[in-house]
Each structure stands twice: as C-alpha cells, then as structure tokens.
Amino acid sequence: VKVKRKNWYYHQYLEKQYAFMIPENSKVLEVGCGTGELLHAVKPAVGVGIDFAENMTEKARQLFPDLQFYALDVDVMELNDTFDYVIISDVLHILYDIQGALKNIRAHCHNGTKIIISNYNYLWEPVLRLSEKLHLKQSTPISNWLSHNDIYNLLEIEGFQVVKTERKILLPKYIPVLSYLFNRILVNLPFFNLFGLVNFIVARPYVYKTTDDYSVSIVVPARNEKGNIENAVIRTPQFGLKQEFIFVEGNSSDQTYEEMLRVTAAYPEKDIKVFRQSGRGKGNAVREGFEKATGDILMILDADLTTPPEDMPKFYNALASGKGEFINGCRLVYPMEKQAMRFLNLLGNKFFSWFFSYLLGQRLKDTLCGTKVMFRKDYEHIVKNRHYFGDFDPFGDFDLLFGAARLNLKIIEVIVRYRDREYGSTQISRFSHGWLLIKMSLFAAAKIKFI
C-alpha cells in the first residue's frame, strides 16, 4: 500500500485511461483487482473483482461494498456469468499460465465483450528492476516480459481478435509541466510512442456467425435527389430476415419528397417509410432516420448512389458474420469513374484517412464514405455516450466513427466502386466543409488521443 501511495500518479493515470475506455454502467470483471480502486474508477453497473490474495479482496470489500470481490485464481474461477468488459491490468507479467488464464476468461465473455489488457513495455525492464531494488515499485516474484506479438499470439490461440493497441506514459512520476508534456503530448507522437511504459491492448472474442438472422433498416437521407429515389429501392438486393427503407427528405426543391411518396405507393411489397427532416444537414437526417428504424442492423445509403446499392449485402455480411462491429465503406481502392471524386476531394480523403487511422488506432482508408453499418444496440451505446463529444458533426460520419472508436468496436472497411452521379449535383461545399473537418479532427484529437 505504501508503494502504491508513492506511485499515486501512475495509478491515477491508469484509472483515468480505463474510465475513458469503458462506458459507465457497464458490467465489468477485473482480474487481479488488488484493493479495488481501478474497478471502482470505471463506475460499473455490476463490478466483480478477483485476486488470489485474500487480504486484498477483504480490503476491497471494506472500501467498496457496492462491488463484488472474490479470492480466486484466474485459472480456475467459475463465476457463471459473462461481462461487457474484462480488465487485465499489470497482471500478465506475473501469471504462471497466461494461455490457461485467457482460456478461462474466454468462458466469461459474450460475443460483444471487450478485453482490455495493460502491461509493461519490455523496454522498461531495467528501469523497473532498479525501481524494485530501491523499493519504489512492488517486487514481483515471476516476470513474463512479453512483446506485443507474444500477447497477440496468445490471444489468437484462445479465440480473441485484437481491436487496437496503444502505448501510454513516458514519465510515471508527477513532475509539474513535464508530466503533462510527456504523458499528454509526446507519448502520443510517432517515435516517442515506442518508449511508452504501458501497452494497452483491446481485444474481442472472435465468433463466426450465420448471416441471415437479422432484420435491416436502410436509412436514405436525401436532398434534391428525385432522380435517384426509385433506383435506391429497385437496385438494392434482398438480404436479411426483413428489410425496411427509411427515406428522410431534407428541404429539397426538386420534388424529392413527392417522388418518395410515389415510390412507396408503386412498390407496396416493399417496407418503405418516408419522413421530412425536422432539422438540417445529413447528420441530423441520419439521426432522425435511425430513431425511426426498427431493424437489428442500421445502414446508411447515400441517395446520390455513388456507392452502388448492389454492394449493400457486402456490408451486411461483414457485420452479421462477426467479422467487424462497425462497417465503413472504402472507395479508394478500385479505379474511379471519371469525375466520381474530384482531385480536392481525393486529397481530403487521403489526409483524413491517415489522420483518423492515427487517432483511432484502427486502419481507416476512407473516412468520408457515407455508407456505414452497425448493430442498433451499438448505436444506442453511441447515443448514450454522445455527450462526451457533443453535437459537433453536421455530416454524421465522424459522430459515428468517434463513437464507435470510444466503444472500442472493431472497425473494418468494405471496398466499393465509387460511381458517377446519374442525377443532380454534389451537396458538398468542398472548401468550407473541408475546413470544418479539420477543426473537428483537431477537436477529436483532444478528446480521443491526447487525453
């Protein structure tokens, strides 16, 4: 305990990081809970901590009577329950059988569980050994100095898929100004990041599922897209248990709304709903459409149809099969049709691709593709946590991307061919919207990366 007090800054940093990565009111299991401070910090609806040391769990029960603590070994624990998040903090390096521990943890996961591991960077081994001799750090009898690849391999063997990784903390002691500079700024920059003390790894159970078990809501936000409405319906293949189209019309001047009503009447065998947008902007239209949706899976199909409706089953299959949890379209692989994406748009996509991959810790090649697909249950979690970012995104793309990243959803991209418009003109004001995207990106950097 005395050693922990000496290292209050380090432990406070871990608590803050885990509280960011785990939404409040989740169901959380902590392996190696000690006296329970970290589990308490994430504010779980149900919190369970296990530790092999009886004196630790007894102290934890006294400190936090609203949480559950058990003196158990992770290799043999049988809690007869599953959890939304499992914390494994500063524990892997002292476990005798890491693979056996992960196997048992897997039995306490449901399909959406996230495992969050934090362990020491092996580059710090000499410093940490010296700290133990100087009684600045608690000594550990067994040490497994694991590289990223070692942990990835163990996770893969036991049926987990790595979602993202990052390193934090260059200066584990509090020194005014320097701690902020090293741990909020430098550690998040290339090169300096290699020397972060703590590796954070987020993983999820990988379960291949059948793809025909879900109903689907296809939300089509549209403004001045009269010539594309019917094609959005007739060109979209049938997939999923049930399919509904939700058209959200946004202050058009070309009778788009009337065309939506005509198409609804012309195809009575299709489940089509039509609404007029109460606000402005695509982001607002998507939110209103999602509120009206009834499907298990929510999909966005841009009404310009530059992402072909024929490709929508690819998005459905990627999500329904369990390959990803947030599916994003990617238009930057196949050759584009003439004029499909102008040069400045292409440059913007390239820049934001790099920047958002850096920010989110997951590969993203095309952040501005409007087609995005996720489960309704995950969208509802994004809505609950939307207050963290605020109402900052008129497009809706980054609101969803940032929300998915904060929930540690596995993001994957489906490659599509970007087509020329067959009707109308682009709704994008390239320069003003480009500047807005830059401002939003910097805002997100402060909210996601430099925390």
Image (cartoon, helix red, strand yellow):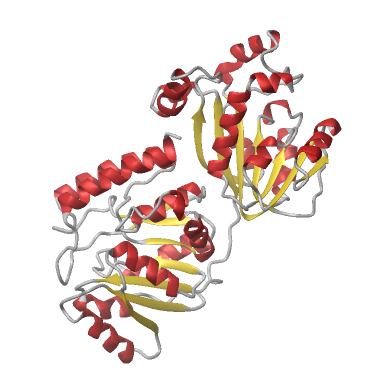
Quadrant of the frame with the N terminus: top right
Q: Position of residue 66 (x, y in %)?
A: 75, 48
Q: Position of residue 274 (x, y in %)?
A: 34, 81
Whether residue 293 sits left or right of residue 112 in the image: it is left
Specify whether residue 75 is in view. no
Whether residue 129 sits left or right of residue 165 in the image: it is right
Whether residue 168 sits left or right of residue 328 in the image: it is right
434 is higher (above) or lower (below) than 225 = above
158 is higher (above) or lower (below) than 80 = above
Q: Position of residue 34 (x, y in %)?
A: 75, 32
Q: Which one is in front, 194 or 332?
A: 194
Specify whether residue 326 is in view. yes
249 is higher (above) or lower (below) than 17 = below
**Count of numbered badges drawn on the protein:** 0
176 is higher (above) or lower (below) than 88 = above
Q: Position of residue 110 (x, y in %)?
A: 66, 55
Q: Quadrant of residue 137?
A: top right
Q: Going 40% across and 22% down the picture, which residue do you hit?
A: 191
Q: Going 47% across and 25% down the picture, which residue do you hit?
A: 183
Q: Going 16% across and 78% down the picture, which residue do you hit?
A: 254
Q: Going 23% across and 68% down the picture, which residue do you hit?
A: 304
Q: Which one is in front, 112 or 175?
A: 175
